[in-house]
Every structure is written in structure tokens, then in C-alpha cells.
Image (tube, rainbow, N blue to C red):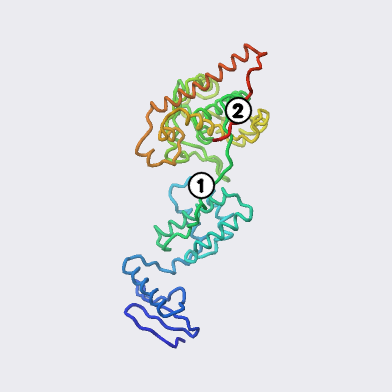
Amino acid sequence: MANKKGHRSFGNVRQLPSKRWQARYPGPDGVIRTAPQTFDTKKAAERWLSLTETQIMQGEWIDPERAKVHLRDYAERWITERPGLRPRTVELYRWLLRKHVGPGLGGVELGKLSTAIIRHWRADRLAAGVSESVTAKAYRFVRAVLNTAVDEDKIILKNPCRVRGADRENPAERPVLTVKQVFDIADRMPARFRVVVLLAAFGSLRWGEVTALRRCDIAEDASWVRVHRAFVEVPGRGLIDGSPKSRAGVRELIIPASVRPEIVRHLDEFVKPGRDALLFTGQRDKNALRRPNFNQRVKWTKVVAKLGLKGVHFHDLRHAGNIWASKSGTSTRDLMARMGHDDMRAALIYQRATSDADERIADRLSELIDKHRDCDQKNEETPDDDSDDGAAGALVPNG
């Protein structure tokens, strides 16, 4: 029982048997509440009451009872209720929550989260051997969840995710393929999959984008390709036909003239006549091409290893195309439009790339292809010429 009591216009403070001070106050709903902590001095308790009164008057007060929800439960609801999340993103968030967020933070109430707790959780993840990349993804996920708790649901006053640099990933550099290496890979593909490689590299297309292409998405002369859908592989659900990775991913690309004849031949030989016929299917079932089946069918790992490109992934084809395009002298805005990146959302929304800029990129890529073919032709005409320094086949560091 308290042995001292202080009276004031808003709320009251009293000293407890422990000699610490307790503050009580009426919320906007008239319910009397107790401060979540006790105070060393009467002055400290009164200062807290004054701050709480100001928050109520300014409409910034938050009911502490609502902040008692556990992060795991709130994050689960956040994933379920968040609009516009792609199926693959939902799977990623659920995995991060289950594997990396839940074990350390899942049982903590939102109102008790602090920057120190977030910092310790992150350090524990890294100490347990979790990569910087995965830890950064988990941190960004928690930050996004708590942003909603602050800005939309008004459950907590501020986001405790304020650990400098915790959101940054430092992935290992990927190799940059040369034009010769891309054609070397394409040459070793089964005929029906050769153009998959060429479009991914010279059109800067993602796996899900290139495999979702249909006859109606490409010009009859293969001069352009329209990207407006993408396949996503979701565990337990198979292939989902949805939109590209971002809003910027919806785009129309001009294809380098030097590879158009090969694409036209592919359309004639391997694609059904209907407008909705997929450009790439399995050889037997004619269903959409799935990455595991593709890798097994073309023996991707063995192919790249035999070419001295061990560790090269399919996505490195797009990466190489992006690097080549970046050297074409076009603006960053036009380049981002071709790549379908959303890092410059505002620029892409308010300023769309012109077809002239895309023509320049395609022309530059054609020049690279023609140069490669000229070199091959000269080598065939002079088989004993050892002047080639062999550097074309080496991996170029990603500068």
C-alpha cells in the first residue's frame, strides 16, 4: 500500500513501499491506467505524466495494452493482410519469420522492443553463422512490419530498427560473361532452348520473365518483346503466372538486330501458332518450362563447368546484358527502364524511356554480336593463327 500520494490536475503519483514512485492517469477513454514502469523520484514520475498528457492532447497517445502483442503474431497478420505481395515474397517472409525472426524476437511484445534488443538479435544471427545477406533481409522484414505498427496501426511510437548499416547486403561479386561466352553456352543448349539463353542475355530478362513469354509478346520479325508477366515458383503451389517483379518490370524491349533471325527461326520451329502459345516449353509435355527441369535437361552445371565457367548461374546472363547495356552511352533512366529495375521508381513513373534510347542499346548489342561473329569467322579462315590471346574466354571481374 502506498504511503505517500501526490495530487495534480492530470493523473497522480504515489510512493510505493519500495520507495519508488508510481504514476497513474486517465486515458482518452476515461480508463485509469498505470505507467508501465516505476520511477526513482517523484519529479521523474510527474515529468512522465506531463509527457503523457501532452501526447493525449496532441492525439499522439498510444494505448500500451495494444503494444503487448507479440512480434511473431503481429508479423503473421502483417504478411496475411499486406496488399500486393507476390507469392514468392510471401514465402520469403514466412521463411524469414519462422527461421530467423521468430527464434530471437518472436516472443517479444512490440512495446518492449528496443534498438538494443534489435541490435543484439542481429549480432546473434551473424554469430550463429547466418550470412550478412540473409540477416539483412530479415532485418528489413522486421523494419517493414514495425513501420506499419508505427504509421498505420499506431501500436508503438517509433520503430526500434535503427541499427546503422543493418539493412545492407554485401553479396559476392558475380562474374560478367563476355559475348563469346554467352554464345558458347547457347551453342551447347538443345536447339529448343538456345533462344532462352540469347533473350536472357541480350534482352536483360529474368528467368520468370523469359519463360512466361508467349507468341503475342514478341514481334513477328522479333524486333521487340513485351514483358508484362512472369512465372514464379512457389513451394507447394507450383508455377504461378503473375506480374513481373516490380512495376518497372512491365516494359517493351527492342531486340538487337543480330539475334532476331534466330528468334524468328525459334518461333517457326518450336512455338505453336496460337497467340497465347508459350515460347518455351518442355520437349514432351509442352507445359511451361520449370527451372529444375531446364537445368536437368540442358545439364547447365556441366555445360558451364566444361566452358571454364564453373559457378555461373542462369541469372548471370541477365547480369552480363545489363553490364553491356550500361556501356552503350545511354542515360541511367533509360538503362533502368530496359533492365526493369525499380530502384528509381520516381524517375521511371514520371519519365519513361524513349524508344530511341532503347534502339541505341539494341544497336550497341548488335555491334558486339557482329564483332564476335567476325572474330569467329577469321579464326576459321586462319586455323593456325595463334594471335588470339584467349582472354575472351576469361571471366571479367564485375567492376
Marks 2, 1: nearer the viewer: 1
Q: Is residue 352 above or below residue 145?
A: above
Q: Nearer the viewer, residue 265 or 33?
A: 33
Q: Amino acid at mark 2?
A: Gln
**Position of the C terminus by quadrant:** top right
- Mark 1 lies on residue: 89
Q: Nearer the viewer, residue 127 or 346?
A: 127
Q: Is residue 399 left or right of 2 when viewed as pictured?
A: right
Q: Element at badge 1?
A: helix
Q: Position of residue 362 (x, y in %)?
A: 46, 25
Q: Is residue 82 above or below residue 274?
A: below
Q: Nearer the viewer, residue 279 or 155?
A: 155
Q: Nearer the viewer, residue 57 or 92?
A: 57
Snapshot quadrant of residue 15 = bottom left
Q: Amino acid at mark 1?
A: Thr
Q: CA distance from mark 2 to mark 1?
A: 30 Å
Q: Position of residue 34 (x, y in %)?
A: 42, 76
- Disc 2 or 1, which lies upstream in sequence? 1
Residue in the image at 51% along x and 37% along y = 231
**Classed neighbour count for the residue bearing mark 2: other residues with Cα under 10 Å, few (<14), some (14–19), many (≥20):** few
Q: Position of residue 80 (x, y in %)?
A: 48, 53
Q: Residue 287 — which label?
A: none
Q: Residue 283 — which label?
A: 2
Q: Position of residue 341 (x, y in %)?
A: 45, 38
Residue in the image at 44% along x and 88% along y = 3
Q: Is residue 267 above or below residue 141?
A: above
